[in-house]
Image (cartoon, rainbow, N blue to C red):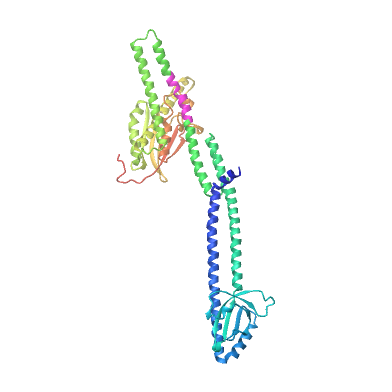
Amino acid sequence: MAISSINKIMRTTAFKLSAIYLIIFSIFATFLIVYIAFNTQVLMTRQMNATIQLEVRGLVERYRAGGLNALVKVIEDRSRRPGASLYLVTDFRGHYVAGNVAALPKWVMDKRGAVDQAVTYQRLGDVDQRKQYKAVVNVYETFGGYRLLVGRDIGERETFRKVVEQAFIVSGFLLVFLALLAWLFVSRKVLNRIDMIAVASRHIMAGQLDERLPVTQAGDEFDRLSDSLNVMLSRIEGLMQGLKEVSDNIAHDLKTPLTRLRNRVEVTLASEEAGAEIYRDALEQTLEESESLIRTFDALLRIARVEAKSTQIEKTTLDIGAIAADMAELYEPVAEDEGAVLTWNSPSQQFIDGNRELVSQAVANLIDNALKYAVRHVAEQRQAQQDHEDEQTECTLPEQARIDVSVATNEGRVILTVRDNGPGIAKEDRQRVLQRFVRLDKSRTQPGSGLGLSLVNAVASLHEANIQLDDNEPGLVFSIGFLQMKPNNQGTEAH
């Protein structure tokens, strides 16, 4: 169990990061300490050798100027001063003449010049004569066989070396301690955040699509990651909710025509007196129902393709004023047949970046929707007035159904607006009617599938356009604001 826990800890990112930081800082600290110690030792050694050489030259000059007595006098005077300097004068037999050195290896005085290694010696007058010291020395032979030794005690240098060694050891323990602190910090802060994200992810995978990754408002990379993933999760939740609603709506709205189609076929087949004419009528009605179902599924597929922002949907610079005029001219004969008035004011040279087929379909859906409900509303008003004309002293017939299509610009957007004088849409239902298969109660008796405005909403979303529904008093004002584009000679579709 302990080995398993250790392996688990060693596999964590916190442990690996802490180990990497420990190794990096250890290498850096070791290099820094060794570099400083080495260069300090070199500098101290150079200074010692330079000082010794300077003193040797001074003493030799004194010997040449005043002889042995002058040299001995200077040596005795300097030997009584406290410090790290060493002096020794011996005769040709090696006997002590002057200085502050009591004993040193015999081979040292046989050398000439600087001795290339540290020499052990005993101080003259030291209480403990067994205590050994180390020094770097320089030997010079004077006239008459007398020899002069000048040196410097290296105890300070050894003390510095020990200080460096202690600093190295303390730094090592300090680095390990700081690495443990870093590991604890990363474990408690970073890994806890990761665990929170993992827990939230498991809840989401378990079906809780409304769950979101935690955001601590710290503004760090985990918050930015959580924000991005939460936006993605919201999008996924919306798509899943839309899929559920589509499934429910298909089951509800398409069940009726399918059931009606089946019942008609069953009744026709069960009729004993059915002749060729009855069968033909049944087949024609069945064909109409089938075509209506096919159109519904085609609309669903088109909406799904548009909402998925398919890469196959190509965009170019369009003159939406020309498109609106084309659609209005197309529906003008239909409006006349229905007894409605269709007008438009759509100046050309109003460019947007979009797909011509989809934008045209959206404009056609808006005109068709406005025409259908405005005509029905005016007809109902006329009928209601005729039913109560005997109770009124003055009779005023309702106006004709009117639909107006216009295109204008406002703050960098091209606004396509379709107005009608129909029944309008209540404020609380204006966002709901943009969803698939949504049909208000008062319009369920009208033919249609409830997908027209859904396609308009999908096209607007694909083109990054905003939709606004307002009251026309009476009727509805449906506006779509597209981003305005500057025309170019190569990508603009001519009207």
User: Front-most of 376 and 399?
Assistant: 376
Q: Please count the marks in the image.
A: 0
Find out whether residue 258 is within the magenta segment: yes
Would residue 174 be found to the left or right of residue 248 on screen?
Answer: right
User: Is residue 187 toward the left or the right of residue 416 in the image?
Assistant: right
Q: Name which quarter of the figure residue 82 lies in.
A: bottom right
* Range covered by the magenta-colored residues: 244-259
481 versus 277 height, above or below: below
Would you say 273 lies left or right of 61 here? left
- The single residue placed furthest to the top in the displayed view is 273
| Front position in the image: 345 or 273 | 273
Front-most of 119 and 293? 119
Residue 280 at x, y percent in the picture = 34, 14
Q: Main secondary structure of the magenta part?
A: helix
In the depicted view, which residue is nearer to us: 459 or 397?
Answer: 459
Q: Does the magenta stretch include residue 440?
A: no
Quadrant containing the N terminus is top right
